[in-house]
Amino acid sequence: MENFLNTLKNLFGDALFNILNGIIALVLGFFVVKFLRFILRRLLNRLPINTTIATFLNSILSAILYLIYILIVLNAFNIATDGIVALVGSVGVAIGLALKDSLSNVANGIMLVTMKPFNVGDYVEVNGTSGTVVAIHMISTVLQTTDNKLITIPNNEVLSNNIINYNAMTTRRLDMTISVAYDSDIDLVRSTVLGLVAADERIFKDPAPVFKLDVMNSSSLDFTLRMWVQSGDYHNVKWQLNENIIKVFAEKNIEIPFQQVDIRMRKD
């Protein structure tokens, strides 16, 4: 190979040889990089990693391949690359400082898809913002609220705050407070509420529902009802049970109290 290159050099001279050598490196390197990127994509797709991570790694490694390719082509044209390498390093440092927050978001994005505190489709709450996760990008996470608004949260804020994942567990405990007037028949209240609970097949029988007098307020007796349901049934069970309690209490003359004040007149 060395003899062949020397022969070409003698035939075409140094300048033409450098041009020919550069063109060969340019064309051949293009197909080599294209082939290596194809192999890289196949390899990343077969690895047991998240699609987001695979896409990010593919973009980073592809950029490195193209950088090496450019340096090889320049060297083949006999163009000094020492200054270019130094310049690329300086530019990289400057870009790194300028994009410090963005790079931090990227790092947190990798942690999100690696640690998996939630997945796409989960209903979560992050720093007081609730919604369904529709996308986990390298820089931000996108939530869709129940009233169909999209909220984009930087990954820094996601990981630096408490994350509540309402879909992480398949079951949830539903707690409700039910208030009645002081003169209500407590046994009737208990049997009525537990009867409504038993009639709803979505509410688990085991663990058994709990209905206890919790607080004796100034104008009401407050009972706590605790029961277990599937996470997906949580809100529907709560809403339906509220309606049923209102209707049955009215039928059985069980008073639901409201704020009231007793005024006593004193005659001197």
Image (cartoon, rainbow, N blue to C red):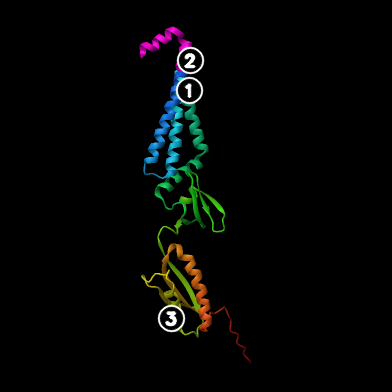
Residue pictured at 50% horizontal, 37% vertical = 97
Kindly identify the amino acid type of the residue bearing the numbered disc 1: Gly
Q: Which residue is mark 2?
A: 19
In the drawing, what numbered circle is on residue 191?
3
Q: Which residue is mark 1?
A: 83
Other-residue count near label 1 (Cα within 10 Å), few / some / many at <14 / 14–19 / ≥20: few
Range drawn in magenta: 1-22
Residue pictured at 48% horizontal, 22% vertical = 83
Measure how far apart labels 2 and 1 are at the Cα level. Answer: 21 Å
Q: Secondary structure at mark 3?
A: helix
Q: Secondary structure at mark 2?
A: helix
Other-residue count near label 2 (Cα within 10 Å), few / some / many at <14 / 14–19 / ≥20: some
Q: Is residue 5 magenta?
A: yes
Measure how far apart labels 3 and 2 are at the Cα level. Answer: 94 Å
Specify the farthest residue to the top: 10
Q: Is residue 15 magenta?
A: yes
Image quarter in which the N terminus is found? top left
Image quarter in which the C terminus is found? bottom right
Which of 61 and 157 lies nearest the eye of the viewer?
A: 61
N-terminal label among 2 and 1: 2
Do labels 2 and 1 touch, CB within 8 Å?
Answer: no
Kindly identify the amino acid type of the residue bearing the numbered disc 3: Ser
Is residue 81 visible in this depiction of the protein?
Answer: no
